[in-house]
Amino acid sequence: MKQRTKAALLRGALFAATMAIVPTGVVRAADVNISIGSCPVGCSAYTWSAGIADVINRNVEGVRVTAEETKGYVVNVKLLQREELEASMATSLSGYQAYAATGNFKGAEKGQILSWMAIVPVAMHVIALADGPVKTLDDLKGKRVGMGQPGGVSMLDADALMETIGLKPDVDFQPFRVRLGNMTSMLADGNLDVAIWNGSFPLPPVKKLTAERDIRLLPIPDEFFARHQAANPPYFRLSIPGKLYSGVDEPTPTFGLSNGLVILKKVPEDLVYRMTKAIFENLDKLKGVHPAFGRVSKETVLNGFAAPLHPGALRYYREIGVPGIEEFVKRTSK
């Protein structure tokens, strides 16, 4: 890790030096290095980053893009803040908090990390056993609640959910901060009353749980979501489809975020424009790398973002007529 950090720092210095001698908005063939932070090798975000890097390297002159293995999204944003990365995978909530220097990133410089491209939604799952004591959000007081592991973005989402409910950990409920696989095992064994996880559906550990026990997914009421979104603008409404998990036959109203790309403000506009264009013009090829890219379109690319777009991405999205782009600009420029 120390060696990679030193290399990243050196690369960041070279990036800054290159930008200092290149006119604003122009990137010559020679050679800007861009690293995209992802997650451990084998996870979806690493596959996405590697695919995007390959497409850009094949189609955009003057840049070399590398997918960097990292410990995950929260770490990615902190590496961006230290300029050890130029872009990264993040949830739209982490991206917004980094831009606004709030939440987990309070005290950082504001406005340095901008939105780039939404890839896939992640949905809040509040999972309980069908025959257990938890049937609605009102039942969580005094319960044993799985909150996700420390350092993971799902734990931040679970913390935000419980804050909106008005419940404090270790006072109003007993938190268990463990991975999803551990939480579903604890549910099955009767050692947990409910598990909270924000992820792309279907969640394999939850599907595995349904082979052993009947479950319920707690619906998120409209009134609750309105209050939650008012305090956390990046969340948006969506439903978990019915029959995705055995025994859960009807759609479950919930909310979520987007998994996507954020990028440093200092990356030149023309370069970001050309990288964005290359990604969009090669979505069919990227779909062969990972099926998530089959869901990316101009109708979805803004989903969940509350931080402003990088000017290079904005320029391309205006060019292709992304629906609601001017409303998005107006909303995020406040």
Image (tube, grey):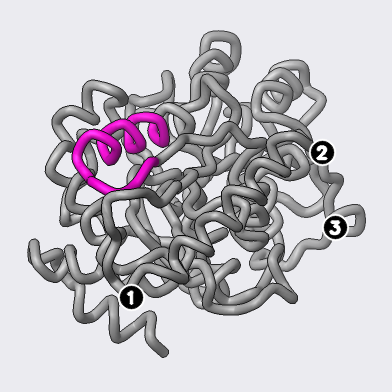
Which residue type carries mark 1? Answer: Thr
Is tag 2's residue or tag 1's residue first in the polypeptide sequence?
1
Q: CA distance from mark 2 to mark 3?
A: 13 Å
Q: Position of residue 135 (x, y in %)?
A: 60, 43
Q: Position of residue 206 (x, y in %)?
A: 54, 23
Name the quarter where the C terminus is drawn. bottom left
Q: Which of 159 and 188 lies nearest the eye of the viewer?
A: 159
Q: Which of 251 and 240 lies nearest the eye of the viewer?
A: 240
Which of the numbered marks, if any, corresponds to residue 24? 1
Which of the numbered marks, if any, corresponds to residue 172? 3
Span colored in magenta: 48-64
Q: Which of 1 and 88 lies nearest the eye of the viewer?
A: 1
Q: CA distance from mark 2 to mark 1?
A: 49 Å
Q: Residue furthest bottom?
A: 334
Q: Residue furthest top?
A: 211
Does the magenta-highlighted stretch encompass residue 261? no
Residue at left 32%, top 58%?
Answer: 303
